[in-house]
Image (cartoon, rainbow, N blue to C red):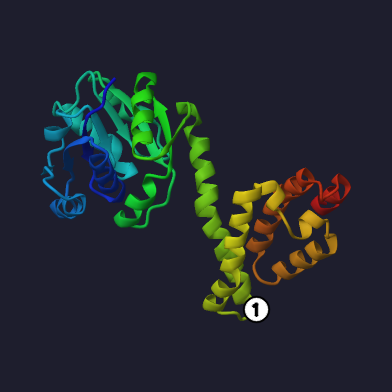
Amino acid sequence: MQVNTVAIVGAGVVGTALASLLREKGYTLVGLASRREESLDKAASIVGGEVRTTTAPQEITAEADLVFLTTSDSAIQEACEGIADRGGFHPGQIVVHTSGSLPSTILRAAKEKGALIASVHPLQSFADVKEAVKIISASIFNIEGDQEAIPPLMELVKTVGGKPLPIETRQKPLYHASAVVACNFLVTLVYFSYQLFEAIGITEADAAQALLPLVKGTVNNIEHLGPVKALTGPIARGDVGVIRGHLGALKTVDPRFTDIYRTISRLTVEIGIKKGTLSPEKGEEILQ
């Protein structure tokens, strides 16, 4: 299946970045659609050139080989059903959404009109459109959905400079959970460490200066060595006394912190044993 023309419904960060990239790579942008005129005006100014915009998405989706629904997750199914009801989908099209958490099956209204359905999720965190345009092309893109839709979508991802990562639809929740752990929970853990500094009177500004280089160095080690070899610290060394000291100190600050520390430490013991610096006997002592 050949994909030449693209319509994008949703003029937020991801939709605008995709519109800009796909046009730059030679795809014909049929148009951009959004409920809000101001969003369309802003997106069109970023994409540049002549851009057709509309608040009636079926006007552009009916003309496209590929339709991207880049609305908020909560609006995807409603938008899809609205377009389907107004004759905006037809056989021979591919209709995709860009949600990381939702499966392609929420686009069933498009499938009922004969379109192929899929999801294409750039595995990246986008602060704004300008930044998204820079980094989206080097992102991993998770792809799942109708098998006939996968090859042209993989080709599109490669064309914009990304790396396709096809999975089965049933695997989508675990895929997204992994992304949440790596991205959102990292933020939570850094916040946790800031809270511990605050408990001993260190300001957030000083905490950032002290801890962020440590975080960056750890991420660099993970990138070059992998998570097992990158592990350092008292659990990796089997230093039971230090860990007892941590638990005693955490109890004086916030009981939640003790629970978090214990839960993460249990998995860290597994990593230390895999690394070979922590013996199973010491690991069991730490778990106890």
Left or right side of 144 for 199: right
Report the label total: 1
Question: In the current view of this chain or complex, which residue is farthest to the right?
Answer: 281
Q: Quadrant location of residue 142?
A: top left
Residue carrying label 1: 200
Q: Between 159 and 44, which is closer to the camera in this rendering? A: 159
Q: Quadrant location of residue 253?
A: bottom right
Q: Between 54 and 6, which is closer to the camera in this rendering? A: 6
The location of residue 268, given as percent across then percent down, is: 72, 50
Quadrant (top left, top right, bottom left, bottom right) of the N terminus: top left
Q: Could you tell me which secondary element the residue under label 1 belongs to?
A: loop
Left or right side of 75 for 202: right
Answer above or below: position of 181 versus 168.
Answer: below
Answer above or below: position of 147 versus 27.
Answer: above
Answer above or below: position of 132 versus 92.
Answer: below
Left or right side of 33 for 99: right
Mark 1: few/some/many CA within 10 Å (<14, 14-19, 20+): few
**Amino acid marked by disc 1:** Ile
Answer above or below: position of 165 versus 187.
Answer: above
Q: Quadrant location of residue 208?
A: bottom right
Q: Tell me which residue sits at (50%, 45%) in the image.
A: 179
Left or right side of 179 for 56: left
The location of residue 36, given as percent across then percent down, is: 16, 50
Q: Between 105 and 33, which is closer to the camera in this rendering? A: 33
Q: Tell me which residue sits at (32%, 50%) in the image.
A: 133
The location of residue 140, given as percent across then percent down, is: 45, 40
Q: Tell me which residue sits at (62%, 50%) in the image.
A: 224
The location of residue 9, given as percent across then percent down, is: 22, 40
